[in-house]
Image: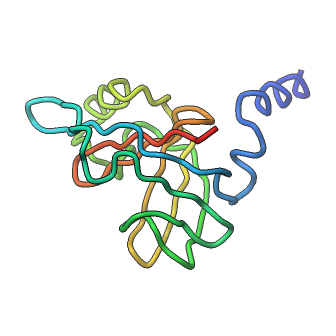
Amino acid sequence: MLRFLFVLLIAVFPASVFAGDAPPEGAWTVASGLRFSEGGAVEVEKNGAYLGKTIRFSAHAVDGPPPFGCGDAKFSWSDMPAEGFFQGFAENAEKAVISARRVQLPNPARTLDVTCETGIFDFHMRDENTMLIMLDLVVYTFERQK
């Protein structure tokens, strides 16, 4: 039974995506942005600052636009509950779960913690080809390039 569960886990979260503390492979493009405010959430205009931009992770760096791009990056993975999404953006657990549903994040979500000289970033995985991050109250959706 345990062997079956282990095989199932590998099928859902491929080793190439979550291998140890290694960052995810490939190039990732910002496909959309959702700005949160007290009045709700609205899509970011198509000419937004990050839309269409690409980041790429390597063993010790992130290549991309500021503030995401950095040398000497440190990576680690965790399973983040909704209350911790977007570095604790929501003021309480109920709002955190509602926000997570709004952006279709599982609870908990596999999260890549990136520490750089430009800051600390939490990339939350929706699935193996989609990750989200909040910056300046905008949740950006990164999609893996194929």
Residue occupying the point 39% across, 70% down: 119
- The answer to whether residue 21 is left or right of residue 62 is right
Question: Colour scheme of this structure image?
Answer: rainbow
Vertical side of 131 occupied by 100: above or below: above
**Count of number-bearing discs:** 0
Residue occupying the point 48% across, 50% down: 123
**Residue 92, image quadrant:** top left
Q: Position of residue 50 (x, y in %)?
A: 33, 52
- Between 4 and 46, the one lying in front of the other is 46
Q: Position of residue 10 (x, y in %)?
A: 79, 33
Q: Position of residue 26 (x, y in %)?
A: 65, 50
Q: Position of residue 65 (x, y in %)?
A: 40, 64
Residue occupying the point 64% across, 57% down: 23
Tell me the quarter of the image containing the C terminus. top right
- The answer to whether residue 127 is left or right of residue 122 is right
Residue occupying the point 53% across, 36% down: 130
**Residue 39, image quadrant:** top left
